[in-house]
Amino acid sequence: MEFKHEPIMLNECIENLNIKKDGIYVDGTLGGAGHSSKIVEKLDGGLLVGIDRDEEAIEASKKRLAAYTNVKYVHGRHEDIVEHLQGLGIDKIDGVLLDLGISSYQIDEGTRGFSYTKDAELDMRMDQTQTLSAKDIVNDYTVQELENIFRSYGEEKFSKRIAERIVTERKIKKINTTYELADIVRSAVPKDAVNSFKRIFQALRIEVNGELKELKKAIFDIVRVLNPGGRICIITFHSLEDRIVKEAFLELQGRCICPKDFPKCVCGFKSYGKVITRKPIVPSEEEMERNPRSKSAKLRVFERS
């Protein structure tokens, strides 16, 4: 299956990156190079660094961007962007794009176990070289650990019931496939709890890939290596991610807490820049109609001072 992923809010991302033709830009979630293909088109003397934990994504992007010699590829996590840049001898950059979450290819391809609508082995690893999989989690984690994951990462109100049912069923037979897990979830929740499947699979994917554990630290690390005027654009797809990004940007912007009648600031607050998007940018009605998977997307932007 060809690696395809329709880039979300493509024009909005390119516009908000405020690309300089001789700048250095990082696509920290390269995917199928949908965003990167437009970034590199705008460069003349600049450099694009594409990072992805999925080796299939990198190989697909190399083919798509084969005509460009000013692209460097890194197999790794976007949480480690600064380390990857240091490995390339790069100290400062002019912009970063992060498109968080899962690609359409990974859902549609079907064999990785990301979707409860396709029968496959419970895997969910974006990086196939790592060891922990969704199968390990559902068969080895305790009831309390499973409940915490489902509640924290899926915001699932039936977390306890689902966790208990998983542990009961795995004593009878090991849980190996997406359909087996979906059947267990179905048996544990009311018939009208149709979103429970999505939330449980989301929670497992986040746990497998450690998607939220280092997100805030990664944002702070990235902002520190941005040149003045450089921007970080982040697309999120659920409230957990968006909350972390929003709060990190506000913290980086900083706020003086001195009384208004003080002639100058004495509280010592430090600002690293400004939030460009007071409210997140969302896809247009036309894009949501064309690509229903974009409906939950939010784009937030921060500029380094």
Image (spheres, helix red, strand yellow):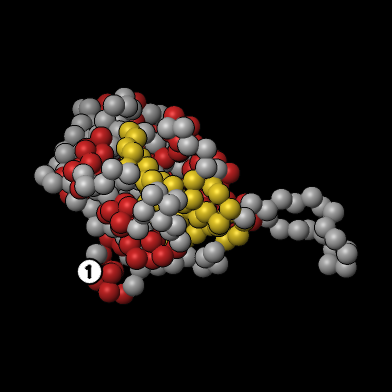
Q: Is residue 76 above or below residue 107?
A: above
Residue 41 image point, x, y percent: 30, 56
Image quadrant where one finds the N terminus: top left
| View extreme (bottom): residue | 285
Q: In this view, does 8 lie above or below 103?
A: below
- Res. 113 in view: no
Relative side of 101 to 270, left or right: left
| View extreme (left): residue | 1
Image quadrant where one finds the C terminus: bottom right
Residue 294 image point, x, y percent: 31, 62
- Residue name at image x 20 percent, y 31 percent: 176
Residue 298 image point, x, y percent: 42, 61
Please name whichever residue, 211 or 219, is drawn nearer the observer in this view of the structure: 219
Please name whichever residue, 196 or 168, is drawn nearer the observer in this view of the structure: 196
- Residue name at image x 28 percent, y 69 percent: 287
Residue 204 image point, x, y percent: 34, 40
- Res. 55 in view: yes
| View extreme (front): residue | 45
Question: In the image, what residue type sits under mark 1?
Answer: Arg
Relative side of 185 to 260, left or right: left
Q: In this view, does 39 lie above or below 164?
A: below
Q: Quadrant of residue 139?
A: top left
Q: Name the residue under label 1.
A: 290
- Residue name at image x 40 percent, y 49 percent: 46
Q: Residues within 10 Å of mark 1 (few under 14, many from 20)?
A: few
Q: Quadrant of residue 284?
A: bottom left
Relative side of 43 to 106, left or right: right
Please name whichever residue, 233 or 134, is drawn nearer the observer in this view of the structure: 233
Helix or strand or loop: what does disc 1 sit on? helix
